[in-house]
Image (cartoon, rainbow, N blue to C red):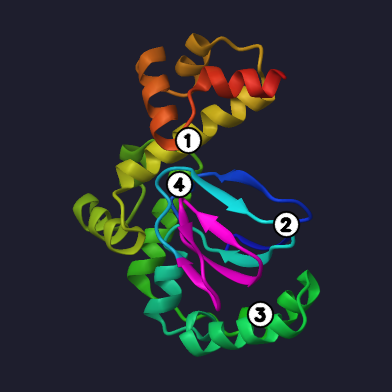
Amino acid sequence: MQAIWFANAQFSGESWLPCDGAKGVIFLISGQLNLAGRALQPPYFMQTISTQSEKVTFTAGTVFCGIRFKPAGLAHLQKVNHSLVAPATLTGIAQALAQHANLDSFIDLLSAHLNAPKIHHQAIEHTQKLIHKIINLTPLNTAYDHSPKGKRQLERYVKNTCGITAKHLARIYRVRQAKQLIKDHPQLSLAQLALECGFADQSHLNNEFNAILQITPAKYKKLIQQ
C-alpha cells in the first residue's frame, strides 16, 4: 500500500489523478463523483490499472476516500487472500463510513487489517523487487541482471500482477521523473529535460509525456511557471 487518503469537497470542481501504474479502492460516501467520465457508485469502486492520468470531477459536498496500492500490491493481497481486500471487508468499511466519515475513522477501520501478519509469496516478492527498481529508475536490463529470476519469467510476473509490461511501467516512471524535474527546475529547456530523463529527443519526450499525463510538457511547464 502506498497511500490512505480522505477528501471532502467544499465546492464542485475537477482534478487530474496522476498515472502511477497501480490500482486502488475508492469509497464514495456522499455526493457525485466521476472518474474518467464514469459515475462512481457506493459502496466502493475498484480502480483499474492506471496507465495514463484520469480526470476526476465532483459536486460540492462530495465526500470520498480511498486506498492506493503500489504497483502489484493489490495482486499480492488478493493472491494471499488478505482480509483487507475481501469484498465483505470493503463493504463493511463503506457501511461504517456512511455513519461516521473522517480520516481518523477511516484509518481506525483499516488498522486491524494493516497489522495482519505478512504472508510471503515468492513470485510476487521477486516481482515487487523488480518493480521497486523500475520505480527508482534503474535501467530495465540492469534490474533484470540483478534478479535471481530470468528476464522472461520476471516479464510474465509483472504482466500478470500489474496488468502491463515492465517496459510500460518503466515508461510511466520516466515520464513521472520528467514531470518532477519540470516542477523542481522549470528553467530547464525541454531539450535538456529530454536528455536528463533518457528520452531519445524532445519529440520523444513530448509524445510520451502527452500519452501518459494527458498534457504536453510545454503546457505543464507553463502551468508551473504561472
**Quick one: label 4 or label 1, which is nearer the N terminus?**
4
Which image quarter: residue 141? top left
Q: Secondary structure at mark 2?
A: loop
In primary-sequence order, the first of circles 4 and 3 is 3
In terms of sequence position, does the residue under pointer 2 or pointer 4 come before the other? Answer: 2
Q: Could you tell me the amino acid type at mark 4?
A: Lys
Circles 4 and 1 in contact, beta carbons < 8 Å: no
Amino acid beneath label 3: Leu
For label 3, the residue is 110
In this view, the residue in front, 189 or 32, is: 32
Instruction: Identify residue for label 4.
Output: 133
Of pointers 2 and 3, the one earlier in the residue sequence = 2
Amino acid type at image mark 1: Leu
Q: Secondary structure at mark 3?
A: helix
Q: Measure the C-alpha gap from mark 2 to mark 3.
A: 27 Å
Residue 195 in picture, x, y percent from top left: 46, 15
> In 3D space, how far apart are the residues under numbered discs 3 and 1 (Cα atoms)?
31 Å
| Whether residue 46 can be seen here | yes
